[in-house]
């Protein structure tokens, strides 16, 4: 089975990546980390036979597998992830150092991993919504739903 509809997402994703950049920059993820997160995502369209009710969903079940690699990226960057906007004490380089030292002292790597996973899922869900909105704005959503329905062996309204 081919994934023609997912192949057609590539161009839309490049455009959404640009639109989503500001959200990404406000997150705790670097561009490199976000790229890794996106490699763990599979896309699906729920209820594609009814484009008005269909929903683009991201399968995030593989995200937990990449968390150790996200931690490796952080270690390569000196152990500090991008700070979340929590005020002037956490901004910039010094804020990252303070957070890193705090994490080391509190032994919160397990908590940190869970938080990173939750943050990644939340960011992916926002990206998915932005991607579907983009496709709808460009009148490409119905076409993708038809392709997805055909790949799933379902009939589209035009075939009935």
Image (cartoon, rainbow, N blue to C red):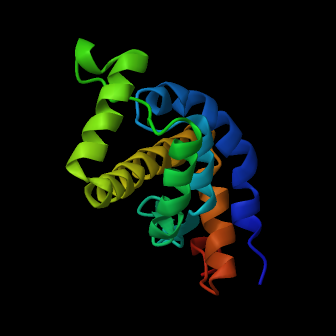
Q: Is residue 26 left or right of residue 107?
A: right
Q: Is residue 80 above or below residue 104?
A: above
Decide which of 128, 141 is in the foreground and name it: 128
Q: Quadrant of the N terminus?
A: bottom right
Q: Is residue 29 above or below residue 151?
A: above
Which image quadrant is residue 131 in?
A: top right
Nearer the observer, 92 or 33? 92
Q: Does 35 appear above or below 28?
A: below
Q: Position of residue 103 (x, y in %)?
A: 28, 43
Residue 157 position, x and y percent, is 57, 73
* Residue pictured at 33% horizontal, 22% vertical: 95
Residue displayed at 53% across by 73% down:
49
Locate residue 92 relative to residue 132 in the image: left or right.
left
Count of numbered marks: 0
The one nearer the camera, 11 or 88, is 88
- Image height of 4 relative to 131, above or below: below
Specify whether residue 159 is in view. Answer: yes
Residue 84 position, x and y percent, is 33, 29
Side (left or right) of 49 relative to 64? right
Image quarter hosting the C terminus: bottom right
Instruction: Choose top left, top right, bottom left or bottom right for residue 110.
Output: bottom left
């Amino acid at each position: 089975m081919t994934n023609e509809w997912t192949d057609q997402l590539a161009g839309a994703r490049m455009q959404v990546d640009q639109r989503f950049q500001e959200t990404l920059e406000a997150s705790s993820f670097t561009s490199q980390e976000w790229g890794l997160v996106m490699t763990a995502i599979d896309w699906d369209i729920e209820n594609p036979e009814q484009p008005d009710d269909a929903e683009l969903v991201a399968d995030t079940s593989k995200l937990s597998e990449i968390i150790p690699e996200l931690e490796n990226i952080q270690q390569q960057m000196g152990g500090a992830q991008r700070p979340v906007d929590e005020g002037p004490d956490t901004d910039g380089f010094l804020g990252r150092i303070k957070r890193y030292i705090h994490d080391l002292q509190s032994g919160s790597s397990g908590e940190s991993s869970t938080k990173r996973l939750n943050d990644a899922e939340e960011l992916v869900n926002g990206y998915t919504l932005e991607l579907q909105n983009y496709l709808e704005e460009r009148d490409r959503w119905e076409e993708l739903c038809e392709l997805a329905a055909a790949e799933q062996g379902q009939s589209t309204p035009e075939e009935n």
